[in-house]
Image: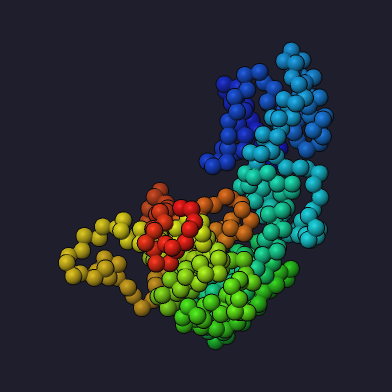
Amino acid sequence: MKPEHQAYRTADGNVRIGSVIYGIGAEIEDPDGWIWTLTEAMDGTRTAAQIAAEVAAAHPRLLLPAATIGSAMADLREAGFVDDAAAPLPAGLVDRDRVRHARGVALLRWMDLSSRASPWNAQLRLAGARVLVLGVGGTGGMAAQALVASGVGHVHTVDPDIVELSNLNRQTLYREADIGRPKADAAVAALRALNSDVTVTGERREIRGPDALAALLAPDGGGRSPYDLLVLGADRPPEIRRWANRVCIALNLPWVEGGYRGPLVTAGVHVPGDGPCWECQRAGEDARRDLRLRPGQSEDAASPRMPWNPASAVTAGLSGTLVAHAAIALLTGVPRMRPGFRYGINLMALGDPVLQRHPRRPDCPACGPLDHPT
């Protein structure tokens, strides 16, 4: 049994397994008590045959066939509660990874409800991944730090700006000594210092249109991108999310984006061909809102636009962390995440989390013509 999923018996004799966290735990009826014996025996010190023999011996009156016990073990494995304790470290990872990422792998193992040969397979997928982070300010800088610390194999950062004093209240990737340096250069230096085991590259470049973004994501001009994922941390020009949506659909490239608007911190998760695209989501959210504007009144009256977005290290850090969590989930499959949604936190109402999911729109100008499931 996974140590994070250690079972216990309830007052009525059932077996609870997988922790008490919503979305992970399960409860198994166990009127004869042998399931409890089975979970205790599956502690990583016995073979499957030894476990079956021990359970059968502990409950002789039940006359349990080895096949029945084996089927129960298979069900627990299929449900994601079991790992092979004897599985070696996968090829491509080394003992240094075992030390560095032990706690991260334990978290992935905790959230992983799929059947894997080794809990390190998810970490191996991270080590082989290539991610482009466009915009390494507050959200993008925090996301880049989390991805590099987590062991993503290659992170490429792109940003046109220089570090300014006004950045430092929220862009924790930088230090006072970086003021005046291009963010791309300072970000590469900081990220390499964080984890020398990954490849970190960067460039100073401004994206001024969809063609420029397409050239960045597919530099050879082909129909495929060398990256596995785009992390969009840039918030300008205002059209950049729409550009990213169209370009990523054309390249069949998953992407995540996020940011903050006052106390509202959110991240969006998008996979072309799998659920609604960003434009579907945006149109659905616009239709859902009832601003009760007077005829001819601009939306800015209800949601004013300012030359700069009020933010702190808290809001930038939260948005970047939510983006990084979504990115890791898409890269590893842990936890399972159905794309095509936006999630987040309202710091003014912590008991009311943000979760926006709208259906794919057949008339969507970006993905409507595509033949894919909703």
**Residue at point 56% right, 66% down?**
253
Q: Is residue 263 left or right of residue 188?
A: left
Q: Is residue 354 left or right of residue 140?
A: left
The percent coordinates of residue 7 (x first, y second) are 65, 33
**Residue at point 78% right, 59% down?**
93
In this view, the residue in front, 71 or 157, is: 71
Q: How many numbered circles does the render carry?
A: 0
Does residue 219 sit above or below 116 in this rendering?
below
Task: Report whether residue 252 is seen.
Answer: yes
Q: Is residue 372 left or right of residue 132?
A: left
Does residue 353 sit above or below 174 in this rendering?
above
The percent coordinates of residue 372 (x first, y second) are 49, 56
The percent coordinates of residue 216 (x first, y second) are 57, 78
In this view, the residue in front, 195 or 206, is: 206
Task: Report whether residue 165 is seen.
Answer: no
**Residue at point 57% right, 41% down?**
24
In this view, the residue in front, 171 or 105, is: 105
In this view, the residue in front, 187 or 112, is: 112
**Farthest left residue in view:** 295
Does residue 374 sit above or below 77 in this rendering?
below
**Farthest top residue in view:** 61
The percent coordinates of residue 277 (x first, y second) are 45, 61
Colour scheme shown? rainbow
**Residue at point 72% right, 58% down?**
124
Q: Is residue 70 left or right of residue 132?
A: right
Q: Quadrant of the N terminus?
A: top right
